[in-house]
Image: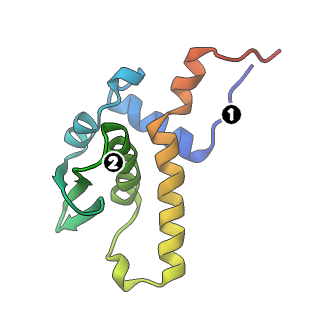
Amino acid sequence: MATHYTHTEDYIKTLYLKLDIKKPQELKFQSIAEQLGIHVFYWPDASQALFTGSKAFILLNEKLTPQQQWEEFCHELSHVLFHVGNQSKIPTRFIEYQEAKANIFMYHAAIPTFMLDQLHIYHLD
């Protein structure tokens, strides 16, 4: 049976395979960031993505668990890959849209569908 992915799922699969990430144990945000040229730092405030010129930074809250930091990284990665500008200068409704899209991306990037499909945890006949 053929699997049909959403655009987001296709994008993540293509991205991860390009980075030679094929198995769940290879999902490490430090490696992903390094390969994409994103600088990751820990700090005590809320996680966020920042841009300085052509450089991208993801600041992760140091108080979060490793699992929470992984989720936050995936959310902020979406901002790095797809969003530009300063959210303080755009309309509230557009910020809400960006955040919703980043959350959808985070869910799929944190637990990629193509990796779930490899588990064969369900039987579709």
Q: Where, quadrant-wise, is the C terminus in this rendering?
A: top right
Which of the 4 image quadrants contains residue 93?
A: bottom right
Q: Mark 2 points at which residue?
A: 73
The amino acid type of the residue labelled 1 equals: His
Q: How many labels does the image show?
A: 2
Specify whether 65 is left or right of 94.
Answer: left
Question: Is residue 22 visible in the rendered structure shown here?
Answer: no
| Front-lying residue, 12 or 24 | 24
Q: Mark 1 or 2 closer to N-term?
A: 1
Give the x, y percent position of residue 29. 28, 38
| Front-lying residue, 18 or 70 | 70
Which of the 4 image quadrants contains residue 116?
A: top right
Give the x, y percent position of residue 95. 47, 74
Q: Name the residue under label 1.
A: 4
Under circle 2, the secondary element is: helix
Under circle 1, the secondary element is: loop
Q: Residue 97 carries which label?
A: none
Dot 2 surroundings within 10 Å: few (below 14), some, or many (20 or more)?
A: many
Cα distance in 3D space between marks 1 and 2: 26 Å
Q: Nearer the viewer, mark 1 or mark 2?
A: 2
- Relative vertical location of residue 23 with respect to residue 91 in this rendering, above or below: above
Dot 1 surroundings within 10 Å: few (below 14), some, or many (20 or more)?
A: few
| Front-lying residue, 22 or 70 | 70
